Image (cartoon, rainbow, N blue to C red):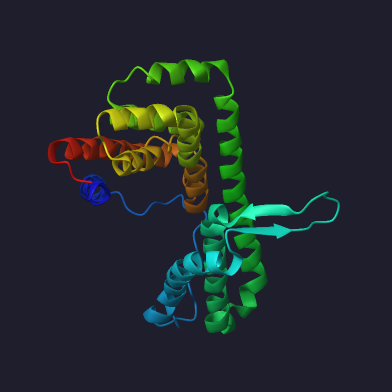
């Protein structure tokens, strides 16, 4: 219920903000823009696929992800060992830790296969060029995210990080403490997963002890931490923000005002959820 409440808050407030911005732009006579970069090519043939066929790859990805998430543990069991040349002993993989990644990758491969099967005739002429653009875009996203995650690791190793962490311990309410800590560290590292993993590695026992002392279910703590990681992570140095601007052909100067506004809305949603819990006790 708290996840639904937070989602509705972001949906209503976020769309209200975007509609206000749209009206303001329309009142100024602002159109689509003139200095356009990285625009997709328009189809010259006029023959477009049926909308249901165009949605098929997305449906396949969703269904395949759901199916693979349940089947991979059955296929491999709790762990899998692979003997690699040059290593003294086999590499053992805990399947539970990689199931989600393997399921998403498998689902995406199936989605790509569906596109190739259903639309290769239309894609044949531009297949090589499109593949190069796709690989370049994938590398851009991967390198941006990896570099920001590494940046976060360096930040976490600095003495100043310990000062910030110790200061965050002073917040008495465990949910507010978790929200502020995770959101702050996500902002410092520029990564939602990085901020959450660093915060939990350093302060998880403090969060759990505080929640148990106030008889707060750990499900509530989990929801607050998860939502808080997706708040202030979208600061200007965030890898996803950099990739988004590169794909859309925009700059920080042109776009970051609205990105930051949505960031504040996501952050406010966490404290909205905390308020809902203390007022209603919903989980």
Residue 79 occupies which quadrant of the picture?
A: bottom right
The image position of residue 263, as x and y in percent, is: 34, 39
**Observer-nearest of 240 and 87:** 87
**Observer-nearest of 36 and 187:** 187
**235 above or below 67?**
above
**121 above or below 9?**
below
The image position of residue 210, as x and y in percent, is: 32, 27
The image position of residue 133, as x and y in percent, is: 62, 61
Residue at left offset 40%, top offset 39%: 229
**Observer-nearest of 266 and 65:** 65
**136 above or below 218?**
below
Res. 130 visible in picture: yes
The residue sitting at the left extreme is: 279
The image position of residue 30, as x and y in percent, is: 30, 49
Residue 256 occupies which quadrant of the picture?
A: top left
Residue at left offset 63%, top offset 73%: 127
The residue sitting at the right extreme is: 86
């Amino acid at each position: 219920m708290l996840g639904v409440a937070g989602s509705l808050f972001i949906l209503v407030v976020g769309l209200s903000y975007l509609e206000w911005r749209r009206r303001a732009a329309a009142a100024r006579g602002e159109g689509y823009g003139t200095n356009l970069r990285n625009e997709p090519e328009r189809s010259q043939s006029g023959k477009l696929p049926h909308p249901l066929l165009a949605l098929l790859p997305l449906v396949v990805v969703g269904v395949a992800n759901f199916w693979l998430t349940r089947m991979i543990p059955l296929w491999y069991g709790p762990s899998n060992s692979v003997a690699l040349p040059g290593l003294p002993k086999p590499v053992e993989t805990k399947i539970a830790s990689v199931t989600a990644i393997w399921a998403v990758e498998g689902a995406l491969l199936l989605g790509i296969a569906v596109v190739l099967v259903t639309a290769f005739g239309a894609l044949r002429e531009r297949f090589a060029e499109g593949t190069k653009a796709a690989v370049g875009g994938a590398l851009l996203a991967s390198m941006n995210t990896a570099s920001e995650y590494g940046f976060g690791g360096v930040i976490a190793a600095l003495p100043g990080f310990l000062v910030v962490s110790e200061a965050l311990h002073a917040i008495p309410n465990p949910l507010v403490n978790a929200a502020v800590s995770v959101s702050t560290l996500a902002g410092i590292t520029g990564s939602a997963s990085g901020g959450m993993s660093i915060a939990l590695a350093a302060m998880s026992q403090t969060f759990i002890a505080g929640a148990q002392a106030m008889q707060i279910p750990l499900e509530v703590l989990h929801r607050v931490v998860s939502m808080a990681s997706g708040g202030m992570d979208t600061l200007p140095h965030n890898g996803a923000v950099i990739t988004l601007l590169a794909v859309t052909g925009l700059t920080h100067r042109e776009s970051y005002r609205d990105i930051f506004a949505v960031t504040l809305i996501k952050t406010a949603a966490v404290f909205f959820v905390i308020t809902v819990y203390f007022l209603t006790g919903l989980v």
